[in-house]
Image (tube, helix red, strand yellow):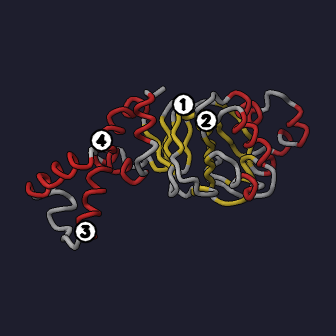
Amino acid sequence: MPSDETIDILRHVSVATLATALYKRGLRNQVIQDVRPLSQKGRNMVGPAFTLRYMPAREDRNQLAEFRNPKHPQRHAIETCPKGHVLVMDSRKDARAASAGDILITRLMKRGGEGIVTDGGFRDAMQIATLDMRAYHARPSSPTNLTINEAIDINVPIGCGDAPVFPGDIIVGDDDSVIVIPAHLADEIAEEARDMTAYEAFVLEQVLAGETIIGLYPATQDENLAKFAAWREKHDR
């Protein structure tokens, strides 16, 4: 689990900035592709990953009677995802059937879940969008997951939207998208992203004042770094 300081930093930086920090370390595929927030909340989702993996459904195994099983992986994931974690679903990038609906996701919220992500779709998307919890998917999808996918395993390494997700990795979602930070890099990525965010605020202020981006963004001229240092001290950033 990351420190409270790291979580606080990650709540105030963009996924785009985090993607650049990870790219500097050779990690190019950490953004979960083709997922978007159901609604904008004005705050970042930040928490360790708790995963659920789907596989192609086989018809004799996926009848409605499966939901009578209290250990059905989809239901069991909702009831065992730890407080403060993000439930990340590998739905095979297939939104023809729902990964979950509003009742299950409401239960996850009431249990203290930080958020939920699927590279498939959610049913009851309009209701999920009103919940006080971040949720991300590819698009609304009404059919039950049993028609296409079988929930098969919990808290194992998965792929979600082409991004590798290991249990405990730190998931950050903003009003644009979602990124996966390897757990062992979370503290240093957060520190760098905080510095990058401060510099970008300085740059935007300069650009709005009419300054050229050449030598400013990226910072390739020492005079701009000196200006930034003075700006940072003035603004306590």
Mark 1 vs 3: CB contact within 8 A: no
Residue position for label 2: 51
Q: Residues within 10 Å of mark 4 (few under 14, many from 20)?
A: some
Mark 4 vs mark 2: which is more N-terminal? 2
Q: Residue furthest front?
A: 234
Is 161 placed left or right of 81 in the picture? left
Mark 2, other Cα within 10 Å: few <14 / some 14–19 / many ≥20: many
Q: Residue at x 16, y 48 (%)?
A: 229
Q: Give the vertical position of 49 relative to 174 (above or below).
A: above
Give the foreground label among 4 and 2.
4
Residue 125 horizontal/vertical position (percent): 73, 56
Amino acid on which disc 3 is placed = Val
Give the mark nearest the N terminus, 2 or 3: 2
* Quadrant in the picture for the C terminus: top left
Which of label 3 and label 4 is nearer to you?
Answer: 3
Residue 205 position within the rendered picture, expressed as x and y whole percent measured from the top left: 27, 63
Spatial distance from mark 1 to mark 2, Cα to Cα? 6 Å
The type of residue carrying mark 2 is Thr
For label 1, the residue is 167
Label 4: which residue?
192
Query: Nearer the viewer's eye, disc 2 or disc 3?
Result: 3
Q: CA distance from mark 4 to mark 2?
A: 27 Å
Amino acid under label 1? Pro
Q: Give, as a three-letter code, the residue at label 4.
A: Glu
Q: Which mark is residue 70?
A: none
